[in-house]
Amino acid sequence: MKENDKIKLLFEKLIASEKHLFPVKGKVNRTTKHGVYVIYSPLNEVLHVGRTTYGKNGLNGRLSNHITKAGVFYREYLKRHNIEMRGAYFFQYIEISDSRQRALLEALTAGKLCPVHIGIGIQKNKK
């Protein structure tokens, strides 16, 4: 199977995967494996597409970062819009061990789903 066909199949599998509510308390406890994920608003808007790149806690760690106010997505989007994801926002994910496949799937998924935060970052003043 060609690589691009494999990535398309992974995209279909990701989109068909179960949606999970972010926990009201504690951390995300789904899997310590690496993968790609999509975060949705309560109105089913795609807010963010991400992937794990490294780290021993895999998807659990990366998704927990978003609800514990760590990382760029929180600082650049969630905080500016006063969004608290716990108990209201959803995520879905797919486990993928191959780092290249994770990168390609993240890119394809972001391109197809057009997360609301892409392209609305703060512009820094040029000197």
Image (spheres, rainbow, N blue to C red):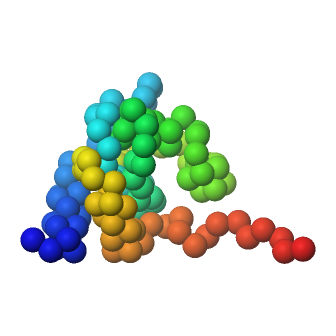
Q: In this view, does 54 lie to the left or right of 29?
A: right
Q: In this view, does 22 lie above or below 125?
A: above
For the residue pair 37 and 44, the one nearer the viewer reads as 37
Residue 51 position in % (x across, y down): 39, 53
Residue at x 27%, y 53% (from the top left corner)? 98
Residue at x 26%, y 47% (from the top left corner)? 97
Residue at x 36%, y 41% (from the top left corner)? 59
Residue at x 19%, y 52% (from the top left corner)? 17
Label tally:
0
Residue pushed farthest top? 26
Q: Can you tell which quarter of the image residue 58 is in? A: top left
Residue 49 position in % (x across, y down): 41, 59
Q: Can you tell which quarter of the image residue 50 is in? A: bottom left
For the residue pair 35 and 75, the one nearer the viewer reads as 35
Q: Is residue 98 above or below residue 9?
A: above
Residue pushed farthest right? 127
Residue 101 position in % (x across, y down): 28, 60
Residue 127 position in % (x across, y down): 90, 74
Q: Is residue 30 above or below residue 93?
A: above
Residue 3 visible in image: yes
Q: In this view, does 73 lie above or below 114?
A: above
Q: Is residue 51 left or right of residue 13?
A: right
Q: Can you tell which quarter of the image residue 6 is in? A: bottom left
